[in-house]
Amino acid sequence: MIVGVGIDLVSVARMKKILGQAWARRFVERVFTPQEIAQCSKTLKPEERFAGKFAAKEAAVKALGTGFSGGISPKQIMITGGVGQNPCIVLSSMAGKVAESMGIDNIVVSISHTDGIASAIAIMEKTSRNF
């Protein structure tokens, strides 16, 4: 049973501009986990990867129905999977507790990007038979 759906779009050009700012490192370290930073940084177009992961984080909190509030921060939503791998969402801390309280036991995510836009959709599911 689907419990929540979220979708988000992020401008790749805007992410590239952010990554070129003097304060980019603080932004990246506040929003992304060390694993995500390593995955994105080793690609030819890191702005596309960062934009895609950011869109997936936004889609996830929309699917939870919380946004980034109530103690939920972007780093609590880790997007795993690199080039050629299916992306997955791993929730921790308050984000994980909210998902658990909603009975969410499966998260489906898809990320896509062009030179201009990164998009992501997240679907939160309750797959147990005890609806």
Image: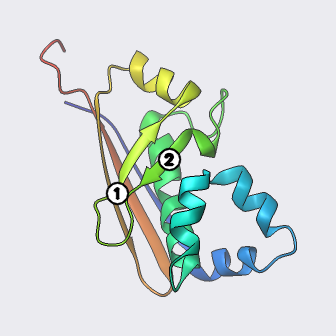
Would residue 17 be found to the left or right of residue 68 on screen? right
Work out whether residue 12 or residue 7 is closer to the camera in this orientation and state it: 12
Judged left or right of residue 89, residue 95 is right
In primary-sequence order, the first of circles 2 and 1 is 2
Would residue 27 be found to the left or right of residue 45 on screen? right
Residue 122, horizontal then vertical, whole percent: 36, 49
Q: Residue at x 57, y 27 (%)?
A: 93
Task: Quote the CA–CA distance across marks 2 and 1.
Answer: 10 Å
Looking at the picture, does residue 45 appear above or below residue 59?
below
Residue found at x 53% / y 51%: 58
> Mark 1 Cα within 10 Å, few/some/many (few <14, many 20+)?
some
Residue at the right extreme of this rendering: 22
Residue bearing mark 2: 78
Residue, x 49% and y 78% (percent of image)?
Answer: 117
Pick whichever, 113 or 2, lies toward us: 113
Quarter of the image for the C terminus: give it.
Answer: top left
Which residue type does callout 2 highlight? Met
- In percent of the image, x 40 and y 46: which residue is there? 89
The amino acid pointed to by label 1 is Pro
Task: Give x and y (percent) for residue 98.
Answer: 48, 23
Q: Does residue 51 show up?
A: no
Q: Is residue 1 above or below residue 13?
A: above
Q: Residues within 10 Å of mark 2 (few under 14, many from 20)?
A: many
Dot 2 falls on a residue whose secondary structure is strand
Circles 2, 1 touching at the beta carbon (< 8 Å): no
Image quarter of the N terminus: top left
The residue identified by callout 1 is: 87
> Where does residue 65 sit, x and y in percent of width and height?
48, 34
